[in-house]
Amino acid sequence: MNLELRLKDPAWASSAIESIREFAEVIQGDMAKAAREGVFPRHAFNELGRRGLLGMLTPREYGGAGFGVPEYCLVEEELGRYGLVSGQTQAQGERWLNDWGTPEQKAKYLPGLANGSILFSESISEPSAASSLKNLQTTARREGGGWVISGEKCHINMGVESDLTLVYAMAPEGLTAFLVDTDQPGVRREHTHPIGLRYSPTANMYFDDVRVGGGAILGEVGEGLATFVSTFNVSRLGNASTLIGIARRALAEASRYAVTRPVGSAVVTDFQGNQWTIAECYAEIHAAVLARDHAANLAQQGREHAMQTSVAKHLAIKAAERVVSDVYALIGGYGLYEEQNFGQYMLDVKLLRVAGGSSEILKNHVAKCVLKDAQLMGLA
């Protein structure tokens, strides 16, 4: 499916895909148990690190693979396809540190992020802030040579399990990002229970006068928006890739069932209407892949890509929602039971529809780009 990704090492890519497939066969029982119980499978995550699948965006001098955005997308798609725990949040931490970290911060955290020994989370969302960073209520005030952080965060993937979290807070100079070790006094965490991707549990996190040093700031004081945008413009492609992987798996599993399911003297896929369902689902996935690949290549080249990543995730959402719904035309009652995966695919896709930028936010951004660009207005 990866038709246009400009990979540095195609041979590595083939090896990585095979490694993920082999590991999925070994770990599928553990992953199913983790999903049922809503538990993060740390051992599976650590194995991905051992196999070199968590450090796509980390330079080799810090223990990473030294690759880039296309390889990150390929790995996330295959992890989604085989139902393995994602390295998406981990990759965001790598990206933040690569782009904004000091030499000391990089040396302290990047090797652990790349091998999985340090689990990363991002403390951004708040109960009353919705999607507006301007409305964040978490504060950071200076005290001595450091800072004191106070506030409440929600929707944090692996918040309870994480070793390091990036906290966005309002300093007197404006929005600022802080690297906070989660074993700091004053950090409290509690699990919440998402409907999808349950092996990546979410959390509320509370920062009760958490004291950090001046070296905890990522970037500069007041530059939080810049750090946020630079990473999330790329991380949308990780979400898009996971959605594509889930859609591929759902269509493949449904098609394999349908080609053998008898209906009188025929099978399900002998009927033209069902063939059209397969064709339309495949076309949606194909379009999402091409948009994702185009955006990933632009990002890797250092070219403007914010609109293209929004288009890519929007199309991936459409494709995945279409596929996990329409495959019921092929599987019928077979898909209505918990021991099958199809119901969980729908819940996983609903979670990813919102995570990292909802479809509505993405469309707003694309529309603004089109309306202010004369060339785009002409659809050139």
Image: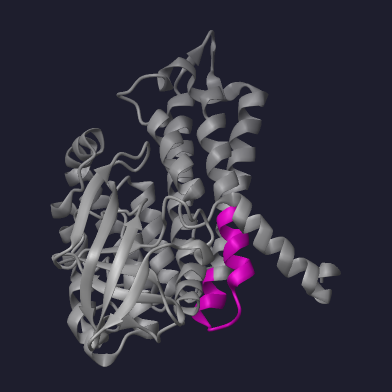
- Seen as rendered, the residue at the extreme top is 264
Q: Which residues are magenta?
A: 296-314
- x, y (%) of residue 335? 42, 22
Where on the picture, by quarter, is residue 98?
bottom left
Rendered residue at 40%/83% (across/down):
99
Q: Of 147 and 258, which appears nearest the observer?
A: 147
- x, y (%) of residue 379? 82, 67
Indicate whether 10 appears above or below 37: below
Rendered residue at 32%/55% (across/down):
86
Indicate whether 252 appears above or below 271: below
Rendered residue at 34%/43% (across/down):
197
- x, y (%) of residue 282? 58, 43
Indicate whether 82 appears above or below 147: above
Please give left or right for residue 361 compared with residue 153 in the image: right
Query: What type of secondary structure mainly makes up the magenta span?
Result: helix
Rendered residue at 42%/62% (across/down):
137
Instruction: Examine the structure image and report whether residue 62 is included in the region drawn in magenta.
Output: no
